[in-house]
Image: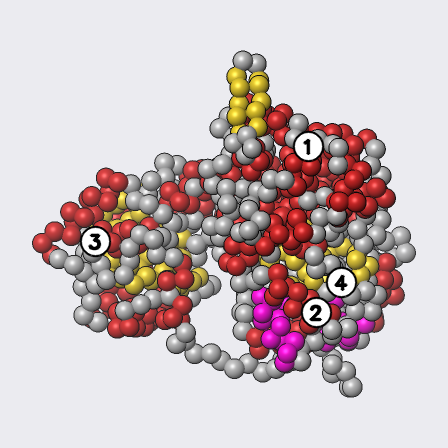
Amino acid sequence: MSDITRNRWDSLRQYTPARIATGRVGHAQPTRAQLQFQLDHARARDAVWHPLDSAQLAERLLKLGPPVLRVNSEVSDRAQYLQRPDLGRRLARADRSRLESAVGAAGAADVAIAVVDGLSSIAVETHAAPLLERLLPALRDNGLKLAPLSIVAQGRVAIGDEIGEALGARLSLVLIGERPGLSSPDSLGLYLTFGPRRGRVDAERNCVSNIRPPHGLDYERAVETCLYLCRNALQRRLSGVQLKDDSVVVDSPRTQRVPFFRDTRGRG
Amino acid sequence: MPFHSLIGSHSYRFDDLRTLLAKATPARSGDYLAGIGAASNEERVAAQWALAEVPLAHFLQEAVIPYEEDEVTRLILDSHDREAFAPVAHFTVGELRNWLLASADSAALAALRPGLTPEMAAAVSKLMRVQDLISVARKCRVTTAFRNRIGLPGRFSTRLQPNHPTDDVAGIAASIIDGLLYGSGDAVIGINPASDNVQAVIRLNHLLEDVIRRFSIPTQGCVLTHVSTTLEAIARGAPVDLCFQSIAGTQAANTGFGIDLALLREAQQATAALGRGTLGNNVMYFETGQGSALSAGAHHGVDQQTLEARAYAVARAFEPLLVNTVVGFIGPEYLYDGKQIARAALEDHFCGKLLGLPMGCDICYTNHAEADQDDMDALLTQFAVAGGSFIMGVPGADDIMLNYQSTSFHDALYIREVLGLRPAPEFERWLLEQGIFDDSGRLVTGESPPPALAAQLKLTGGTA
């Protein structure tokens, strides 16, 4: 007789990615489920602690056209990054001057794009280049002028405010590694802020989340949403909650059937 | 008023009570992020020496946040019961620790509740080791009721947390069924919705009512949305058992949550008026967590543990069924690692129980915290020994909507087994009738769902 009590309601897994019907050994999870969890956690941890290879990423991004600058936040190491979000929102002083002088004769741009490691450099290394390959031409086709690209180590979302400000851009786009979930270590987020400058708050941003094909949002959809937001932000001269209000609200039915519940008359 | 401590030849000075409390707090990242933590290990202990000498009566004289500026301070001081305080009124903080450990029994602790302020509870906890936090909390008895009774001696409950990234009703129901078959869900079946759309919230309330009635489960449901959304759902006739809200220990932080005491009162009354409880009418479910006030930029220079205890003053004004400290969810900038998370959880449980609350704990961590399953197992064991009221039950410990790790259905079975703990009695009887538990409290669900439950389900592929 096997030590494993399997769960023959595993057909319910078709309805959710949750770890249901895992079975049990005594009261514990079977070895296979236990090791799968450990593997997923290990990957999520590695995503957080893996240092961004800025040089390699810069090489890939240079092929896309605009100049690329590599900068750092005020954070000195990963442990400090995790404990001091305030430092991760600020550019190292020397890097701010470098950005300011990069504006040069070209003058002000419409869009400043920052690629930031955030909490998952794996997300950035996996998804930033293919996303930008599609996004940059689309922005140019819309007549938008691009500032130099920046690659930021040990950064938080709000560092895009200071970068956009230093580059004198009308709006900033931040591509950043999101907090890894157990089953999603490589999720990329895109944040748009109109009129970037230090002191902006999160309510003034729009977010396109969970960019991670094939499991999450694909690049084409992300680019489409990003373009929609860029056009509207520049036209209405704002971003954040007020911009989001235009999104379509789908009216949902009052109740919804559970396909695996038997019909019971005279109930609920 | 300044406080002083002489350690060897070095004299330490602490300008006021909130500074003293902050410096005396065991190290945690959030207090350093706020710039208020002790500058050295010696300064921390110097502050603890000084804090031990502070008379409890002083806490009624010096508020950590001014009375005029903060309605939580006003609630604390205006509701303070001097008669209940009398037995400890002559103690210092250090003497309170001695009395709690040596002399206080369950009856004395229950009588003391309205006489203690959260700041007193926080202060004494800062002088206590983990074993002190456990042994005193274990003596506190707090029982609440709705369709079952939570917190009875020898009982340990679970919130079934069946979240889904898009609030898909079938997906949520699938996790609920899995959880029930593992004996989870006596504290509440509680869904964190991904959307705060009121129609979506109403739909989830109907799902919960359908499940609870269909299977005749002696438990309660809750959709953990903002209190104003729940009020709107009630106004539109939704079947609401419990009203949820996140709360914090300062008025400004609560403003950040979009609430105040008056709104909570309105919500409690509207929910209680539905009269859906059968054994009691504790209708509120609160969640808290150290660091929330700092996160909202509303901490007034007060340490995060003292502010957490102040959130319990808010909670107890509304006689909740459940209070849950979501300890490791906030991230490493507030609680850096497994050690800080575990200590914070046991402090929260101790302070909450001392103040008379039905304290549960979301024993949890995020992937950017220095913590893992071993840390959670250790905390789960300590929390249950301390007499914790309830924990979460999440499929495989992986919350696929909120992206963090909590406790699994299996974890609850483990702790009940090793410590001989049982679910709420009404729920236990239901588990027995369904053939999910046997009468010694062991899970007996086999490969297929037991017949009574299976009869309600259409499962494909070999079952039933």
Span of residues in magenta: B207-236
Q: Looking at the image, how many numbered discs can be counted on the residues? A: 4
Q: Viewer-nearest of labels 1 and 4?
A: 1
Q: Nearer the viewer, residue B26 or B119?
A: B119
The residue where tag 1 is placed is B55
Q: Is residue B223 left or right of residue A266?
A: left
| Contact check, label 2 and label 1, Cβ < 8 Å | no
SS of the residue under disc 4: loop
The residue where tag 3 is placed is A167
Considering only order in the chain, which callout, 1 or 2, is on the residue closer to the N terminus? 1
Considering only order in the chain, which callout, 4 or 2, is on the residue closer to the N terminus? 2
The residue where tag 4 is placed is B282
Viewer can see residue B178: no
B405 is higher (above) or lower (below) than A133: above
Q: Determine the residue located farthest toward the right in the rendered image.
A: B439
> What type is the residue that disc 3 sits on?
Leu
> What type is the residue that disc 4 sits on?
Asn
SS of the residue under disc 1: loop
Q: Mark 2 to mark 1: distance in Å?
A: 38 Å
The residue where tag 2 is placed is B269
A267 is higher (above) or lower (below) than B264: below
Q: Viewer-nearest of labels 2 and 4?
A: 2
SS of the residue under disc 2: helix
**Residue found 37% across the figure and 45% down from its top:** A88
Write down the quadrant of residue B21 in the picture. top right
Q: Nearer the viewer, residue B443 or A257?
A: A257
Q: Mark 3 to mark 4: distance in Å?
A: 56 Å
Q: Residues within 10 Å of mark 2 (few under 14, many from 20)?
A: some
**Residue found 39% across the figure and 36% down from its top:** A77
